Amino acid sequence: MRSSNPVFSRRGFSRAGGYAGFGAAPQAGGPAAAQGNPYAQPQGNPYAQQQAPSNPYALGDQHNLTPDQLQQMYGAPPAGPLQTGRMTMDDVVMRTGMTLGTVIVAAAVAWATKLPMGVGFGAALVAMVLGFVQSFRRTASPALILAYAAFEGLFLGVISQAFNERWSGIPMQAVLGTTAVFVGVLVAYKTGLIRVNARFTGFVIAAAMGFVLLMAANLLFAAFGGGDGLGFRSGGLGVVFGIIGVLLGAAFLAMDFKQVEDGIRYGAPREESWMAAFGLTLSLVWLYLELLRLLAILREL
């Protein structure tokens, strides 16, 4: 399971056309698990705890067993033991809370100290580089993820203060909107209104890449030509692209929920909860910024 970076493809997206490689029933160590479970190996799932050899009451002739065999049978752990070292929902919630908490604290510091805009954009550049590095790593680095969260928080604090000075109250409205979208997507995902599959994932990634390229082109035109560039961030067209950005953020959240669910179902190692936290943080930051821009455009109309 890889982070849900909204710009780049995710570790969970299989080139073979399946989402996250999860195409088979979650049977640890079985042939189906070897094909569909990314946490299984051809020799068996390394994260599956050894089970009891078999049910002694299902054997044909138990009286032929040696004392050593009986000792091995009745001394083995029971079937379905409490497994440790695997990702749980509590792990995901705790790591996500730590990551988002770091973002919020850093943003509050930037807001209270009134950091200059240049410092904020410098922090954004550092956060982007750290996000790139973690996105392409095979394993999660808690220090790297928390460092990303800290620099991202500094940027959010600076940009939020700038928006608040021009449009009072917008940051709080964006926070409430982000929370509402998060809850709405979670409910829609759990009730089956949103179904994340390979087609959904491919469409969202393609749409996100196109969206980012258009916004980059708009920024370049604005930087060298002045004004609003291509007009993608102002007026009626800005509202349309703002809504598209919010919808993409909601889609990223649905994909994150799917990754978390699959990781828990297939016995992902506990360290993967950091990747889940990283992905959820990326999606929430994307969503907050898009709502911030959209609200600002609506205030100007």
Image: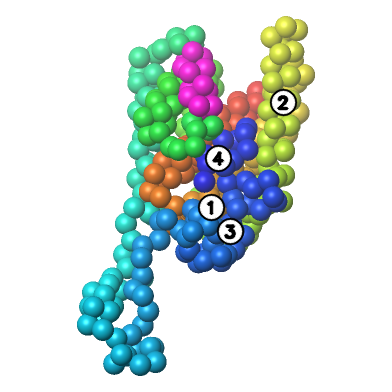
- The residue labelled by disc 1 is 38
Point out the stretch of residues depicted in magenta.
120-133
Task: From the viewer's perspective, tell me whether residue 149 is left or right of residue 36.
Answer: left
Q: Are marks 3 and 2 in contact (CB under 8 Å)?
A: no
Residue found 69% across the figure and 50% down from its top: 16
Q: Nearer the viewer, mark 3 or mark 2?
A: 3
Q: Nearer the viewer, mark 2 or mark 1?
A: 1
Disc nearer the start of the sequence (2/4): 4
Q: Secondary structure at mark 3?
A: helix
Task: From the viewer's perspective, tell me whether residue 96 is left or right of residue 174.
Answer: left
- The residue labelled by disc 4 is 4
- The residue labelled by disc 2 is 213
Q: CA distance from mark 3 to mark 1?
A: 6 Å
Disc nearer the start of the sequence (3/4): 4
| Disc on res. 217 | none
Disc 4 packing (10 Å; few <14; some 14–19; many ≥20): many
Residue found 60% across the figure and 53% down from its top: 21
Q: Amino acid at mark 2?
A: Leu
Q: Are marks 3 and 4 in contact (CB under 8 Å)?
A: no
Disc 3 packing (10 Å; few <14; some 14–19; many ≥20): many
Q: CA distance from mark 3 to mark 4?
A: 20 Å
Residue 159, percent from left and from top: 50, 20
Disc 2 packing (10 Å; few <14; some 14–19; many ≥20): few
